[in-house]
Image (spheres, rainbow, N blue to C red):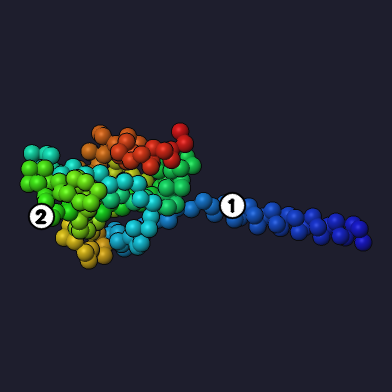
Amino acid sequence: MIIKTSTHVLAGLALTALTVGAVVAQSPSINTATFQADGAVHVPQDYRTWVFVGAPLTPNTLNGGSAPFPEFHNVYVEPSAFEHWSATGTWADGTQIAKELVTIRTNDTTDPATGASSEVSGVGYFQGDFVGLELTVKDTVRYAEEPGGWAYFSFGHDGEPYATIAQAFPTDSCNACHEANADTDFVFTQFYPVLSAANPN
């Protein structure tokens, strides 16, 4: 009886070990973007609930009247990708980073020379309306020919509702600038203290 019990226990332990091993092998996972057969990516869902990392601003009034990127850029990292970044200091395959463009709020106090306005907290730049949405995806298999395996998409710059799908920009539209100027694997981590603080390296 003792021998049989031990055998059953050992068999149970072995089965448990195999089950645990199978679970471990499937984790951790990155929540990846959804694509159509023609390569178009679907607009990400609930991106405003992702990890918000910052909102750079380079207004026209401080850039000779015509800045390349004159809006606020609200940047969100998909949570599983942020978790991987926080654990390793690297961007995993499947990483999604959303960038929503927001106008500068204006009112009767807006200074035409600077574009700044007066609000209850003081004079400065405040967010206005959502006007565009872009997405960056890292996929070294799907985008093996793209530098770093990154692809860049736009769902429109005309405000909501945004387009539901988008095709990747040509390589020379975004990758070259990111490759030359971004601190970490094509991502401008130097402009986002939230990312710098989370980097374990």
Residue drawn at 17 percent across, 49 percent down: 118
Q: x, y percentage for residue 55?
A: 28, 47
Q: Which mark is residue 128?
A: none
Residue most extreme to the right: 1
Tag 1 residue: 24
For residue 111, side relative to residue 168 (left or right): left
| Residue 9 sits in quarter | bottom right
Q: Nearer the viewer, mark 2 or mark 1?
A: 2
For residue 52, side relative to residue 124 (left or right): right
| Residue 69 sits in quarter | top left
Tag 2 residue: 108
The reply to whether the C-beta atoms of the residues labelled 2 and 1 are less than 8 Å apart is no
Q: Quadrant of the C terminus?
A: top left
Is residue 154 positioned above or below 58 on the image?
A: below
Three-letter amino acid code at disc 1?
A: Val
Crowd tier of the residue under label 1, counting other residues whose Cα lies within 10 Å: few below 14, some 14–19, many 20 or above: few
User: Foreground residue, 126 or 146?
Assistant: 126
Residue 194 in view (yes/no):
yes
What element does badge 1 sit on? helix
User: Foreground residue, 132 or 104?
Assistant: 104
Q: Quadrant of the N terminus?
A: bottom right
Residue drawn at 11 percent across, 42 percent down: 114
Question: Which badge, 2 or 1, comes first in the chain's sequence?
Answer: 1
| Residue 10 sits in quarter | bottom right
| Mark-to-mark CA distance, 2 and 1 | 59 Å
What element does badge 2 sit on? loop
Residue drawn at 25 percent across, 34 percent down: 180
Three-letter amino acid code at disc 2?
A: Asp
Q: x, y percentage for residue 200?
A: 47, 36
